[in-house]
Image (cartoon, rainbow, N blue to C red):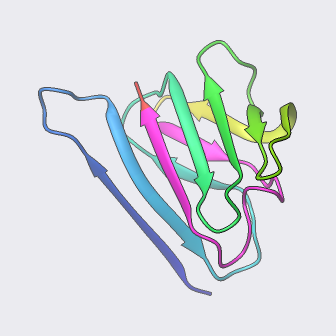
Amino acid sequence: MTVTSTQSKVPASVNNIAIGRYVSTATAAAFKITTGFQPRYVKVVNQDGLEQEEWFEGMTAAYAYKRLQTGTASLSTSLGITVAADGFTVGLDTDINVTDEQLSWLAIG
């Protein structure tokens, strides 16, 4: 199993923005990203399949606003994004979280 994960944080003057990428060659599974702060907004984009999901402060855990490459948009009520005090978890939505496909993410606190 190979997992590649990178992230960067903007300078201290803007503390609560983090971006990164995630790729796993293992069987797709939910995974946690630790940002060091509780996000108020999270966006995850599958760079290979061009699907994306967004979570906004106030949404229920595991929910996400999802847009597919076909242009279809929907509210996912499970397997979406769950925010924690120190980051967020990307659920196992098989349109977004796919083995060997690069995910890029943005979290704003």
Tell me residue 59's x, y (percent): 71, 18
**Toward the viewer: 92 or 103?**
103
Tell me residue 16's x, y (percent): 31, 29
Determine the image quadrant of residue 81: top right
Identify whether 50 is placed above or below 73.
Answer: below
Q: Give me the residue at 59% from left, 31% from top.
A: 83
Judged from this view, the residue extending furthest toward the bottom is 1
Determine the image quadrant of residue 66: top right
Asked if the stretch drawn in magenta spans residue 105, the answer is yes
Asked if the stretch drawn in magenta spans residue 45, the answer is no
Judged from this view, the residue extending furthest toward the top is 58
Q: Give me the residue at 33% from left, 34% from top.
A: 17
Q: Quadrant of the N terminus?
A: bottom right
Tell me residue 27's x, y (percent): 76, 77
Q: Give me the residue at 59% from left, 46% from top.
A: 44
Identify whether 65 is placed above or below 30.
Answer: above
Q: Which residues are magenta?
A: 87-107
Identify whether 85 is placed above or below 100.
Answer: above
